[in-house]
Image (tube, helix red, strand yellow):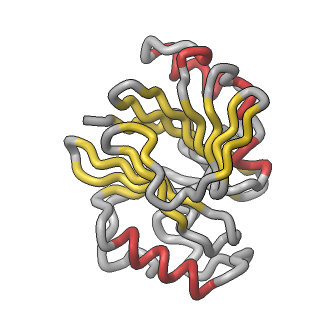
Amino acid sequence: MPTVHVLVPGYVGQRVASTVSLIEAEGALIIVDPGMVANREAILAPLRAMGHNPDMVTDVVISHHHPDHTMNIGLFPNASVHDHWAMYRDDIWESMDAEGRVLAPGVTLWETPGHTPQDITTVVDGDDGVVALTHLWWQSDKPVEDPYATDPEALHRGRSRVLGTASLIIPGHGAAFTPDSSTPR
C-alpha cells in the first residue's frame, strides 16, 4: 500500500511555499508539487533522510501550473511529470486527461478545477485510509472562498467530491488535516 509523507508543510502570507509531498508506492516514488520553498534543501534533506535521492523519483505531479507549485520540478531529472492534460518525460509529450490516471497501485489523479481550470488532486488509497493532495484548500480552515478561484462553483464541487472520500487532506499551503464539519465546503 502506498504511503504519503509531507516533506515541506507549505505556508502563505508575506512569503509563500507549496506543500511538497512524497508518495512511496509499489514501483514508484512520487513527488507532488515541488514548488517554491525557502531553499532546495527544504525538499532534498528530508528526501535523503528517508533514503531516497532525487534521481530515484519516478514521477512528479503538479496540481496546477502556478510557479509556487512548479518551481523545483527540475530537481528530479528521471521523473515523468504529470499535469491536467499530459505526461512529460525528456522530449516526450504524451497527451492524456488526468481524470482516472493511475500512477501506481493506489495512486490516482482526479481533475478538480476551481482554483485554476487545470487543477488536479492526487488521491492515495493506503493503509491509513484515503489521502487527498489538493489545492482545493490552501490550509485546513482557509480560505473559505478562494479569492483567486477561476470557477468557484467547480471548486465547491471538487471539495464535495474529495470530502466524500478522503480521511486526510494535504492542502496546497499548509499542514495535513483530518476533514470534519468545520472544513470549508
Hey, which quadrant is residue 84 in on the image? bottom right
Q: Residue furthest left?
A: 127
Asked whether residue 38 is in view, the answer is no
Relative horizontal placement of residue 54, taking residue 92 as reference (left or right):
left
Where does residue 141 sit, x and y in percent of width and height? 48, 70
User: Vertically, is 49 above or below 86?
Assistant: above
Q: Quadrant of the C terminus?
A: bottom left
Q: Quadrant of the N terminus?
A: top left
- Camera-side residue of 101 and 67: 101
Report the residue at 55% width, 71% height from top. Answer: 142
Asked whether residue 2 is in view, the answer is yes
Where does residue 44 sit, x and y in percent of width and height? 61, 21
- Camera-side residue of 107 and 17: 107
Report the residue at 35% width, 71% height from top. Answer: 163
- Camera-side residue of 31 and 104: 104
Q: Residue furthest bottom?
A: 153
User: Vertically, is 86 above or below 53?
Assistant: below
Hey, which quadrant is residue 135 in on the image? bottom right
Report the residue at 39% width, 68% height from top. Answer: 162
Where does residue 87 sit, x and y in percent of width and height? 64, 43
- Camera-side residue of 97 and 28: 97
Hey, which quadrant is residue 12 in on the image? bottom right
Report the residue at 36% width, 31% height from top. Answer: 25
The number of callouts visible is 0
Relative horizontal placement of residue 64, taking residue 21 as reference (left or right):
right
Relative horizontal placement of residue 64, taking residue 6 as reference (left or right):
right
Where does residue 146 sit, x and y in percent of width and height? 64, 76
